[in-house]
Amino acid sequence: MDLATPILAAALPLATTMMVCPTTHNDWDWQQTFAGYYTCAFNEFGVRGILDNVVAILESNNTDFRFSYAEVGFLREYLTEYPAKAPAFNNMEQFSLLGGGITSPDNQVTHSEVFIRNYLTGREYLDSVNLTHTIFPVAWLPDDFGHSPQLPVLIEALGMKAIGLSRVPGSPQPTPCNATQTTAANICGNGTTFRWSGRDNSSVLTHFMPDTYAGITGFEPMDAHAGMTEFLSDYGDCVWPGGTVFAPQGGDWQFPDGDPVPLGYNWTGVPGPLNSSVTGQLATFAEYYDTLMKPSTVIGNFTLFAENYWTGYFASRPQLKINHYEAAQLLLGAEVLGSILTVYNGTTPDMQASLNNKIAAGWDLLVPSTHHDFVAGTAPDSVYDCGTNCGTCNISNPFPGDVLDSKGQLYMSNQTVALARDAMSAALGQLSATIQWTTQQNIVPVVVFNQLGLDLPNTAMVEMDDPTGGKVAYEVIVDGTASPVQRSWNGQIAVPIPPSPPQPINNSTFIFGNGAVSLTLVQAFGWAIENLTIGNKSYVQLGAPANHIGVWQDDGNLYQFGMEYVDGDCGTGTFALHSSLTASGSATLLENGPVRWRFNATLSDTFGNLYSTQYDLVRGETLVRINTTGAAPHQLGGGSSVLASFPMRTAEGATAFAMEYGTAYFWEDREPQKSWNGLTFRASHDFAQLITTQGGSAVAAVYHNGIPAWTINATTSTLHGVLLRNTPATGRGAFGTDNGTHSQYYTLDVLPQLAETGYPLRTSLYAHTPLRTLPLNLTQPVLKLPQEAQLASITPLDSVLAVGKTKNNKLVLRIQRSNPADEDVNIELPWRFNQPIPPPPNPSIVSALETPIDSAPPVETSRSSTSFLANRVLMTLEVPL
Ligand SMILES: *[C@@H]1O[C@H](CO)[C@@H](O)[C@H](O)[C@H]1NC(C)=O
Ligand SMILES: *[C@@H]1O[C@H](CO)[C@@H](O)[C@H](O)[C@H]1NC(C)=O
Ligand SMILES: *[C@@H]1O[C@H](CO)[C@@H](O)[C@H](O)[C@H]1NC(C)=O
Ligand SMILES: *[C@@H]1O[C@H](CO)[C@@H](O)[C@H](O)[C@H]1NC(C)=O
Ligand SMILES: *[C@@H]1O[C@H](CO)[C@@H](O)[C@H](O)[C@H]1NC(C)=O
Ligand SMILES: *[C@@H]1O[C@H](CO)[C@@H](O)[C@H](O)[C@H]1NC(C)=O
Ligand SMILES: *[C@@H]1O[C@H](CO)[C@@H](O)[C@H](O)[C@H]1NC(C)=O
Ligand SMILES: *[C@@H]1O[C@H](CO)[C@@H](O)[C@H](O)[C@H]1NC(C)=O
Ligand SMILES: *[C@@H]1O[C@H](CO)[C@@H](O)[C@H](O)[C@H]1NC(C)=O
Ligand SMILES: *[C@@H]1O[C@H](CO)[C@@H](O)[C@H](O)[C@H]1NC(C)=O
């Protein structure tokens, strides 16, 4: 634990001013759908009524009034319905947008890039209605159920000045069982605003709202003075840097004024003396920020540990997380392909517009799913999956049109995947129609697209539909050389020989391998991996098989796992293995090389529910790719989670006492502070791996996409991941069942490397991003692309290119590094050779929101390559075209 210098309370001035920030907290959806909240949240006026109220006050010439607002998705809906009201929001002194995102995004389980696009999409809309100037660049996340320990990396990269947050261990929601949860009290004692640093020296001013985003709302709405006085008596002796106390006033769907709405607020007397020493005023967060920026204000450094406020939501509603990830990767791929077409002149303005519209439609539908009750999986059944019964408000002024989550989150999330697939196939279609080739008899040319900004290992495999429909035997030539191929069990890959029929497995111990790695699967352990050998070295612990799948009793709810305190019940909830899955029914060797080996088995839990688990080995690889499909049982009484467990050691016998895991655009290897007894899950992005000790060496890794909840049991050197969850318990306003069947893909690697090498990130992206293929269009193209074309490549190896998109005559590249040390990165842009002389202006470093940044490192450019000093792990490069 590295603790920064605390500030001394005594060195700071006593509070003299209290700023009250009128706002409202408008969830995109939660207990109601978006349309429900817009039209009739709680009191039949809905968000529409709230914004009507705001407009009325802003137009009333009350110069004391202020209003701050985070949810641009609702503002967009309102201004689409009432376009003439946009100018009412124009005065940035009085009206301030908190960050400008479509919604207030969850920061732990949201796909890193979708988090960024939430703000980009909001800004693009605000530009269109001339309200961008009202944005104050703060990541307003006061309802997020905990905070990624490397959040400053992402927020600084966005060019934002501040973070506003509230839920940390020990903060008022939840109150009980806080004996070990000191984070809130420590922040209060060190300073409610502090500088929070990421591992790469990024640093973001962070304000903690000690009484939640509701602030003084919880007190006397009709008596401002009473609310302010009570807030001061509870939190006035926290350290307030600069001496100004800041309190939001804006709980869930709070109305800014009392008339005519019942849930109002009495502003009388707020500006003016509050008691003998404190004066009150209404303010935006921007005005509060200005008081913090006074040279006399001392702001301390503080290392925030708040990732384990609630953790059950890391695994709730897995299908929303799987779809969210898949849609994001497809859209990123379509962008890269669109960029290749653009920089190599393989496109026309019409083709570009048509592809860009499809990509934009995908992002537009995807970004609201970053909402902290959407991808988090914390909406009740009635909003998660409501089909045609999503509840309507019986009001005179209904929602205009049929939109978004009107059939529930699951349906909307399915639609994001459908739109993203559509964008990818449109991009591939354009590509296949523009590549030049020479007609040869009996040759079917095929194009292969790798969307990842990294080199593939030479074991990479591609799967595609058989262009002859399985009628013709043929061989595959890659770069002039015959390549091994096989027909997959469902007829996909083509091979020159008839496919071998699936081989039923009768042995109770089944050994299979690809020449690089060998697995011993044991029927008695539900076909878990009893032994994994490479050469003659073994990596699994004796008697403790890997990918051991079990049903766990989980007394938690959508937000919390069973071992977390549940509503006043301190540490007595259960989260423990109930029973292991056992082999049941068939086990089959579906494919037996020479490209892929695939084993598939049916498993069962003690209630007789069936699951399947599948192991894939690919030619030349030591990775074990696994797919487990099933539904978490509902017969347990209380809730259940289904976990995969990997008790691992190195070939030399070393075991693990710590873990490393990916966060949004970086990684973490510190232990969280303990908030409860038992396991503490982490929201892991891309990978989770066992390491001997912090800074030691890597023992075994699991790569994944949609399964963020992983943890270590250091006593047994075991990595546990939650595959499925079904926790119908009530509590916290949203109870949910999940009897759905979901497929989880994950990959075991017993030859891992530490996160800072970039190896786990690269390998995870490689293992979970398929190469895309399409036969070339048989008409000779008008626009001609070369047979091989590359958008960009990057060195050193710890770096990947996470984004490559073109817009407004610029190519935007996002650089993600895994090593936090400052280092020169070099980006090859081969197509620049062909640009006219003189070439367009030099590339430059910008924020992730594509705005200029202070002290951007200079970019050096030669004819086709570009380099700069990467002093942060997440950087964005704009290359004029
Ligand atoms: C606000 O002030 C403007 C200009 O002084 C005036 O035209 C308008 O009537 C005032 N509105 C209200 C509601 O008082
Ligand atoms: C946009 O808003 C600004 C600030 O109020 C104003 O100066 C400008 O005239 C507006 N532009 C348009 C096109 O309405
Ligand atoms: C813990 O909660 C109790 C009851 O809500 C409260 O009185 C106490 O101050 C809290 N302690 C800490 C350390 O937050
Ligand atoms: C400041 O925070 C540290 C932990 O980061 C804690 O040990 C210390 O007690 C806090 N100081 C005060 C005055 O609360
Ligand atoms: C509003 O608050 C003021 C000051 O506390 C109080 O005098 C007044 O009665 C309140 N108005 C209403 C309508 O409650
Ligand atoms: C916070 O950390 C920075 C960088 O390490 C340092 O320059 C600064 O002096 C620290 N601030 C305080 C108040 O300790
Ligand atoms: C694209 O077309 C422009 C204008 O015709 C030409 O200058 C440039 O060299 C072409 N670029 C490539 C990569 O072929
Ligand atoms: C989502 O898609 C899956 C597979 O494409 C389908 O099985 C499921 O019924 C869909 N769910 C909804 C709510 O549309
Ligand atoms: C399965 O058992 C048969 C004999 O019963 C044996 O020939 C074969 O090698 C075994 N296969 C594996 C993979 O263990
Ligand atoms: C795994 O296989 C290796 C090599 O065959 C053998 O030495 C080792 O004892 C086996 N380990 C287990 C747990 O079966």
Image: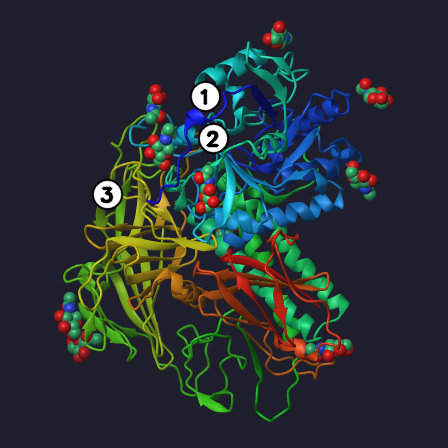
Which quarter of the figure is the C terminus placed in?
bottom right
Of marks 2 and 3, the one in the foreground = 2
**Contact between labelled residues 3 and 2, with CB atoms less than 8 Å apart:** no
60 relative position to 331: left or right: right
At label 2, the amino acid type is Thr
How packed mark 2 is, by other alpha carbons closer than 10 Å (few <14, some 14-19, many 20 or more), is many
Residue at far bottom of view: 441
Is residue 668 or residue 516 the one in the foreground?
668
Of marks 1 and 3, the one in the foreground = 1
Mark 2 → mark 1, Cα distance in angstroms = 10 Å
434 relative position to 725: left or right: right
Give SS at disc 1. Answer: helix
User: Which quadrant of the view contains residue 132?
Assistant: top right
Mark 2 or mark 1, earlier in chain? 2
Is residue 275 or residue 431 the one in the foreground?
275
Residue labelled with disc 2? 192
At label 3, the amino acid type is Ala
Q: Position of residue 546 (x, y in %)?
A: 24, 60
Mark 2 or mark 3, earlier in chain? 2
Residue under the image location 51 percent in, 91 percent down: 480
Numbered tag placed on residue 576 in the rendering: 3
Residue under the image location 48 percent in, 28 percent down: 212
Residue labelled with disc 1? 235
Mark 2 → mark 3, Cα distance in angstroms = 38 Å
Give SS at disc 3. Answer: strand
**Contact between labelled residues 1 and 2, with CB atoms less than 8 Å apart:** yes
Question: Would you say residue 366 is visible in this rendering?
Answer: no
